[in-house]
Image: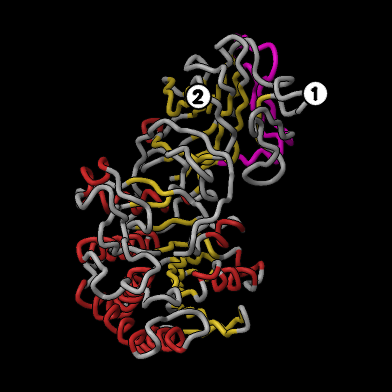
Amino acid sequence: MRILRSIGMAAILTIPLTLSPPTASAAAAPDISLANVKAHLSQFQSIATANGGNRAHGRPGYLASANYVKGLLDGAGFSTTLQSFTYNGATGYNVIADWPGGDPNDVLMVGAHLDSVSSGPGINDNGSGSAAILETALEVARQGLTPAKHLRFAWWGAEELGLRGSQYYVNNLPATERAKVKGYLNFDMVGSPNPGYFIYDGDNSDGTGSGPGPAGSAQLERTLQDYFTSIGVPTRGTDFDGRSDYGPFIAVGIPAGGTFTGAEGIKSSAQASLWGGTAGQAFDRCYHRSCDTITNINDTALDRNSDAIAYAVWTIATTTPPAVVWQDTFETATGWTVNPSGTDTATLGQWERGDPAATSSSGTKQLGTTVSGVNDLVTGRLAGSSAGAYDVDGGVTSVQSPPVTLPAGGTLKLGFSWYLAHGSNSSSADFLRVKVVGSTTTQVFQQLGAAANRNGAWGSAEVDVSAFAGQSVRILVEAADASGASLVEAGVDDVKITR
């Protein structure tokens, strides 16, 4: 994992949601052998020892590591490529391995950086992630997995110098091929000696840092959460802060996820109570140091994360994508009705479909960017002379979808992207709500305001609406400024019901 850099993108806080796991059947994931993963780590250690103590970009230890990985994958039946690139006058390599079969237009990628820093062998950072995905790939071959998606594994070069290998790969992937990559899972440091159990915060439910990942990232996060929940291990979110190889993927709109056991950050008392280990010490005291050797690994964390990787690969790659029952991206008018009950009280900032203008007041409030296309549902799309010119004022504004006929039977999910932004003069009286109106009306989502500044950032939500199966329903979206003179902006995009 490379040194931290700042990529400031405002975020918002979300309320907890109860979200269901994927409903389509998936093949049972295997138990990845810890002994096999550690055998790969021993090979990386031996390679470093024989080549000046490291496996860094442009050094012989890196190429030997890449050849070791490629040789095993070639022997297992993968189609592999050693992709070369140049950085700082030295040649680097990515190892790209494709498993035969699966839908070539629906690619799941799994990646880890293979290089170390020049000061040490990099066994946790990132031999651990490299070894864990390598053994997962080899288990795919042993079991003769026949996934619905096409599986592609990648070991990146020169991550420690600024994500150079993964950036080269993404930059040189033709647009038609890039569009086929529907998800990327990244594993960078998964055996830290004083470990935490972190999952990349795809849905921005933590409300910190850089905001959510591209649409689909929340589903990747939930899949990994499901595994750790199944073994009774609590997890916490980690921000998409740009420190690892998911960065180039999310920059071009590819959903991403992954796990992380901690680097130079200090474990808090609360985290030690949650996971054990030593409070007041780094998750990895040998981060970017010569002592990041084969002894710098927590076997339990490495084992759990290796199994989590396999669970995610088997679950995601073998699950048939849900069928779309209905969707609206708001690029054309489909019959949404503003103030459907005739009881709205908002005097300004009523919902409308359109191309939103960006506004700012102590940070971004109305987003000028949509999740897809140029239009969304937005509260007063114009900017006006100030951020408060077209925000929600005076009470509630609502908008309702055209009728949607839901099929009988099966599991039905309602998904959408959203944001609620407000100034520090807000309160919990302000809100964004989503309801499903059928034979009964059920509120399925709520975000309340608070007396704190919250900037706009797209988040995503998915809720189970199976209780409405067989009915004709409408989706009702409400936003309110009910705190007096508070500044409130909201948006909704890409609403979809799947089965």
Q: In this picture, is 14 found above or below 274?
A: above
Queried whether the magenta region covers residue 123, the answer comes back as no
- Say what amino acid the circle numbered 1 marks: Ser
At label 1, counting other C-alpha atoms closer than 10 Å, the crowd grade (few under 14, some 14-19, many 20 or more) is: few
Which mark, by number, is residue 433? Answer: 2
State the CA–CA distance, disc 2 to disc 1: 28 Å
Q: What residue is at 46 percent from the left and 67 percent from the top?
A: 109
**Picture coordinates of residue 394 (x, y %)?**
63, 10
Label whose residue precedes the other's in the sequence (2 or 1): 1
Which mark, by number, is residue 385? Answer: 1
- Say what amino acid the circle numbered 2 marks: Arg
At label 2, counting other C-alpha atoms closer than 10 Å, the crowd grade (few under 14, some 14-19, many 20 or more) is: some
Q: What residue is at 52 percent from the left and 74 percent from the top?
A: 158
**Picture coordinates of residue 363 (x, y %)?**
64, 33
User: Most prominent secondary structure in the magenta stretch?
Assistant: loop
Comparing 17 with 258, the one in front is 258
Instruction: Please tell me in which quadrant of the rendered image residue 333 appears.
Output: top right
* The N terminus - image quarter: bottom left
Q: What residue is at 58 percent from the left and 73 percent from the top?
A: 169
